[in-house]
Image (tube, helix red, strand yellow):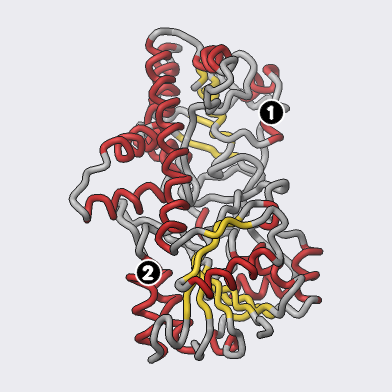
Amino acid sequence: MNNKIAIVGLGYVGLPLAHAFSTKYPVVGLDINQERIEELNNGFDRTLELSEDQVKEAIKNGMQFTTDINDTKDCNIYIVTVPTPIDNENEPDLTPLIKSSQAVGKVLKKDDIVIYESTVYPGVTEEVCVPELEKASGLKFNKDFFCGYSPERINPGDKEHTVTKILKITAGSTPEIAEKVDNLYKSIITAGTHLAPTIKVAEAAKVIENTQRDVNIALMNELAMIFDMMNIDTNAVIEAAATKWNFIRLTPGLVGGHCIGVDPYYLTHKAQALGYTPNLILGARQINNGMSKLIADKALKYMVKADKKLNGSNILLLGVTFKENCPDMRNTKVTDIIKELQEFECNVDVYDYWVDKSDKETKDIPFIDNLPYDSHKYDAIIVAVAHDEFKEITPEQYAGLSKGEPIIIDVKGIVENPTWRL
């Protein structure tokens, strides 16, 4: 069978995947955002995961970008790469996944395969998505159509570990389909694949990847708080401990983004539904979510010690994205620092040259366009993200930005002799 692939969702995951598949197969890229489709048709990827040349290469290969599910009717493989966020109660929000399944179901045909890449708790594909596909299509699962699961492992902003260079977990709803799904990904993934025995195993593997990292970072954050009370340099402790071959070297910091700060809640949701309270995982989430307040409190504390008035003070935040050298704002915890400071009537300025200021999602962030060196404006400066440009700022330039005694809160360990370092 000749494959024609529909990629449903053209974000940080879907677009690079669509580009990779377009080198071997006819591909239709579907997204609900008309503005996104128009930008892509003009060669522009606002996520910066693909260059203009790469987007145009995909179009030259025959890639079609559309908002109309009917444009995918002649596809036989559907790959769903939509977000799986959490709501205000930290509960999984499966709405994008359900709506995508309903849309795909409307055009699903006999022998088609629907593959999900979105991170979920074990069971979502077969227990939540499949019923939506059956209802919308009138077809029977594992008789008329089939499913696969291959969790995304994209690392936003990483130009080295791109989609084809990251080993891919695959799974299918029957042994035969599992082989087909695995072979499909093998055709573009140079790093290879790992065929999991069931879809649930693949779902579980993905969700624990980020849960493990979240718990490990929470440990480092808790250690950093303990060592801070002891007046011990946490980074020096890590340097010393890392001389042992089996020490896992991680550093404390903010945990944002769409994966690490979100995925554990999918696992805890399922665990609690089964009657088990995952205290370690929930405790890690609580620690990591509390780091924004800790950082804001440290800035305020040092301002008070320097006899600087909090109400009406000026504070500069360097960086607002969830990670360095990337425009990704999803679930960034820097915005929580802003809110904490504003509660004390502080005037906050944010400088981040990676962010598109015209994006409606950033309209409430108090951006400035340039760093006002020699303005002596700021009572405190918080270096929240390790963008490359920030690593070049000198002590003299920090002094020029600062009003009176410079107060520099270094979240990322990139400042020479800061007032306080996480």
Q: Is the residue 116 above or below the residue 329 in the image?
A: below
The residue under the point 45% across, 51% down is: 205
For marks 2 and 1, give the one nearer the viewer.
Answer: 2
The residue under the point 53% across, 15% down is: 241
- Does the rendering let one see residue 418? no
Quadrant of the image occupied by residue 42: bottom right
**Looking at numbered disc 2 in the image, what kind of residue is underneath it?**
Thr
Q: In x, y percent, where is residue 114? A: 50, 76
CA–CA distance in space, label 2 to label 1: 40 Å
**Mark 2 crowd level (few <14, some 14–19, many ≥20, 10 Å Cα):** few
Tell me the tag on residue 391: 1
Q: Is the residue 33 above or below the residue 243 in the image?
A: below
**Looking at numbered disc 1 in the image, what kind of residue is underneath it?**
Lys
Towards the viewer: 310 or 4? 4
Q: Is the residue 368 above or below the residue 102 in the image?
A: above
Say what secondary structure mark 2 lies in: helix
- Does the rendering let one see residue 140? yes
* CB-based contact (under 8 Å), mark 2 and mark 1: no
Image quarter (top left, top right, bottom left or bottom right) of the N terminus: bottom right
Tell me the tag on residue 95: 2
Q: In x, y percent, where is residue 9? A: 55, 70
The residue under the point 58% across, 38% down is: 319
